[in-house]
Amino acid sequence: MSHFSRTSRIAGCTLVVIALGAGVTACSSDGNPLSAEPYDAAGQISFNGPTKAGKKADPDKPLEITAEGSEGRITDVTATDAAGRHLSGELSADGSRWHSTSPLAADAHYTVRVSTEDEDGAPGRRVVAFDTGKPRTQKRLSVTFGPEAGTYGVGQPITADLSQPVKDKAQRAIVERGLKVASSPVVEGSWHWVDDKKLHYRPKEYWPANAAVQVRSNLDGIKISDRLWGGTAKSLKLTTGDKLVAVADAASHYMTVYKNDKEINSIPITMGKPGFETRNGVKVVIGKEYFVRMRGTTVGIAEGTSESYDLPVYYATRVTWSGEYVHAAPWSVGDQGSANVSHGCTGMSTSNAAWFYENVRPGDVVKVVNSYGHTMEPFGNGFGDWNVDWAKWRKGSALFTGDPEGPTESDPARLSPQST
């Protein structure tokens, strides 16, 4: 008699499987296919997991579920661990085999639901639970999200710093799938690998004003490679404030400040002179310092030369780690609004600098236009992330599908030189 015959439905099996309600095609005694009661499919399926009580599945091995016999098939499999994480998998076209395509979590408890169909189209179901063992290696990948919790401007990227380097693309994909960013309202965004140990996340456009952003990791216990497993990570919650964008025009010598897309101030400024041109492009405010002592030696200007300086600077809003600020420059008020005379910073009167300092926060946007300086570098000197166009940004994701118009798989303070 076939393994999928009615009499075999009561056979016991302690194997683990993954599946959830299949489509019902069999007819019941009253002729209604939707009224058929699923039978116990324990005797129709087998898996490569533990078959004895107290035994644990090897998280290094994929989970496999097979149909016993030739007259029936598996129609659906789902597996979920106690943390609610789903195990992805593939079902063969003939329904004879299902196997997991993502790593099992180590030291986890899984519930597996399998749906079957016999030769007559009658639906069967089986629910099994099993545990996985501990990883063979104690090397864990921890993740630290940034910035710190708080309220930021709409240009603030999310950062993820990894405790171990990840170079392989497939392994990067596993890591990236486990890093979750959710916002309200919902926006399109993507992770971008800066290097082997750092990722940045940003939306396609700036974050919406007054949005809520939550960042978390699902990597705990997940196998990334034979020697590396996911570890714990502290989740992060951020909010954004009003949309504040300051456009500094090196040609007109004015900075126009917009709040929620409406102009709220126009400030005469001076920017980098020839040989010290201010960087073009979008920068993000990374800090504010009421007082900074700026020396020319920190940016390579020899002491005692015509370009050397040593100045007390107030109301300094930092936009690069290399020392570019928007700050008070009372010594150049006569040139502000008409000429560029600084060593790369954006200078303005003390009163205007105080206003700017008091009205901006980290994450707000400073955009420089019409300067002869090079474009702000994307990474390593602050946040130049917005100077990477969206198509190129998405290609920096390990989950990029290759479609330039489509979503990625994952969609729906240190001391430094200073300039004046």
Image: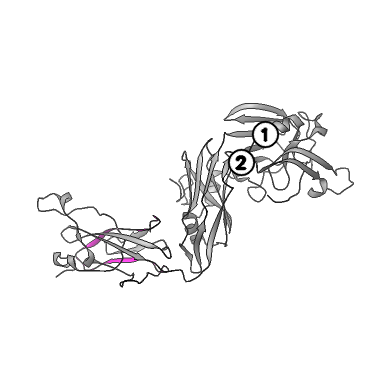
**Residue 334 placement: quadrant:** top right
Q: Position of residue 294 (x, y in %)?
A: 79, 44
- Residue 301 image label: none
- Residue 363 image label: 2
- Residue 358 image label: 1
Residue 75 located within the stretch drawn in magenta = yes
Q: Identity of the amino acid at label 1?
A: Glu
Q: Identity of the amino acid at label 2?
A: Gly
State which tag comes first along the sequence, 1 or 2. Answer: 1
What is the crowding at mark 1: few (fewer than 14 residues within 10 Å), some, or many (at least 20)? few
**Residue 167 placement: quadrant:** bottom right
The answer to whether residue 234 shows anywhere in this view is yes
Viewer-side residue, 168 vs 85? 85
If the image is split into quadrants, where does the C terminus sit? top right
Residue 98 located within the stretch drawn in magenta = no
Residue sitting at x 25%, y 69%:
13
Q: Position of residue 364 (x, y in %)?
A: 62, 38
Q: Give the magenta range.
A: 59-86
CA gap between label 1 and label 2 equals: 14 Å
